[in-house]
Image (spheres, rainbow, N blue to C red):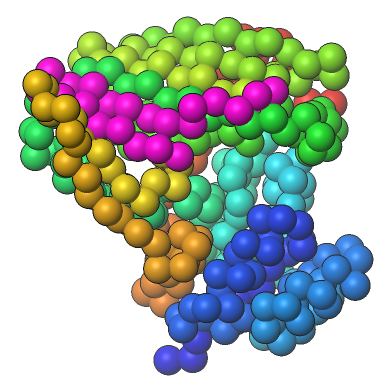
């Protein structure tokens, strides 16, 4: 079977990481990179072994040899570019947050279904080796009944325009908050009783730092904090009645620490990446496309829509609306 030609739309920092990853993979062919600046596309293609470079996104989607396009633009443009790709018959792997709101996502999933094309939100955390191991450890009962989860994700990113600019769907929620929200969903599921939150806005009107508490119908609780103003512990802890689990840099963890009650030293489970970690979502997408499937079990459209609905409600509670909405 011919390997899929993998292409990247945009040539920013996340695109560079994906290009580096794909250049090491045997499952796909590094085919084309497109940017609005041809020079940037050429430089990245040359550095990572991609065959072609384009100075416009229209050229990319009109290339009949392109199979799968990874969208690495700011959130504000995901909907526009994903729609462009789908309308030209291309499968899509779109960086998170998939779109800026639930309505946009619904339209893209309907369009992809009508054209029998694969489209998925690239939430790499769900595909990493630690995800399956964490589920196994929790289900084994090692820490007993999991009751409480805490997760923080904070970096000083005030110098990055797409984080602070409302025209680019800036704010901590879509860029950072999606990770704690995703992690809580991975651990505690979807049966939510209520959500309470607080937000501190920047001088440009986007959410700069946020706190979200989720109470589940079975009594479990997740307490999440995220900020683009300061570096946080960037750690998740799952507390059970027999012990607790610690994941440093939880969204890209390569080890899991399990502390049992009355034991000082943790049991450590190593879950390293093959390359950078981005390879797992690419492999899942390729496998689904080869099987003629329109989504992956790890990241179903329903889950993307559910998380977006939560984020829509949080922004509504905080009275935050992007200028283009």
Is residue 238 found inside the magenta-colored segment of the image? yes
From the viewer's perspective, is residue 279 above or below residue 148? Answer: below
Q: Is residue 306 visible?
A: no
Q: Residue at x 63, y 31 (%)?
A: 155
- Residue drawn 11% across and 27% down? 263
Residue 293 placement (x, y as % from top left): 40, 66
Residue at image x 57%, y 84%?
29
Q: Residue furthest bottom?
A: 1
Q: Quadrant of residue 288?
A: bottom left
Range of magenta residues:
228-249
Q: Please name whichever residue, 324 or 72, is drawn nearer the observer in this view of the structure.
A: 72
Quadrant, the C terminus: top right
Q: With 209 as the anchor, is 138 left or right in this view?
A: left
* 124 or 237: nearer the viewer: 237
**Eyeballing the image, is 88 above or below 309?**
below
Residue 240 seen: yes
Does residue 233 belong to the magenta stretch? Answer: yes
Numbered disc total: 0
Q: Relative to 186, does residue 269 appear above or below in the rendering?
A: below
Q: Residue at x 32, y 27 (%)?
A: 237
Does residue 324 appear left or right of residue 216 in this picture? right
Question: Which residue ends up furthest to the front in the rendered image?
Answer: 264
Say which quadrant the N terminus sits in: bottom left
Residue 47: percent from the left, percent from the top?
Answer: 73, 78
User: Between 247 and 216, which is closer to the camera in this rendering?
Assistant: 247
Q: Position of residue 117 (x, y in %)?
A: 54, 65
Which image quarter: residue 296?
Answer: bottom left
């Amino acid at each position: 079977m011919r390997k899929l030609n993998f292409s990247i739309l945009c040539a920013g920092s996340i695109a560079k990481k994906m290009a580096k990853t794909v250049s090491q993979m045997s499952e796909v062919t590094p085919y084309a990179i497109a940017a609005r600046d041809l020079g940037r596309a050429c430089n990245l293609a040359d550095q990572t072994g991609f065959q072609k470079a384009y100075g416009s996104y229209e050229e990319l989607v009109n290339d009949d040899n392109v199979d799968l396009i990874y969208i690495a633009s700011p959130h504000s443009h995901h909907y526009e570019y994903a729609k462009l790709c789908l309308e030209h018959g291309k499968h899509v792997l779109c960086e998170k947050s998939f779109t800026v709101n639930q309505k946009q996502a619904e339209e893209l999933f309907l369009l992809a279904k009508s054209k029998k094309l694969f489209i998925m939100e690239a939430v790499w955390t769900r595909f990493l080796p630690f995800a399956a191991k964490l589920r196994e450890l929790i289900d084994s009962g090692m820490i007993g009944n999991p009751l409480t989860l805490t997760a923080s994700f904070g970096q000083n990113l005030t110098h990055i325009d797409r984080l602070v600019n409302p025209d680019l769907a800036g704010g901590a929620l879509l860029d950072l908050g999606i990770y704690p929200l995703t992690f809580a969903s991975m651990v505690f599921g979807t049966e939510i009783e209520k959500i309470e939150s607080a937000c501190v806005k920047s001088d440009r009107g986007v959410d700069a730092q946020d706190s979200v508490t989720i109470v589940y119908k079975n009594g479990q609780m997740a307490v999440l904090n995220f900020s683009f103003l300061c570096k946080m512990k960037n750690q998740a802890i799952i507390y059970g009645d027999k012990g607790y689990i610690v994941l440093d840099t939880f969204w890209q963890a390569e080890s899991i620490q399990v502390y049992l009650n009355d034991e000082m030293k943790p049991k450590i489970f190593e879950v390293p990446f093959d390359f950078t970690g981005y390879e797992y979502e690419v492999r899942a997408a390729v496998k689904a496309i080869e099987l003629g499937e329109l989504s992956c079990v790890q990241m179903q459209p329903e889950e993307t829509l559910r998380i977006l609905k939560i984020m829509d409600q949080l922004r509504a509670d905080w009275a935050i609306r992007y200028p283009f909405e």
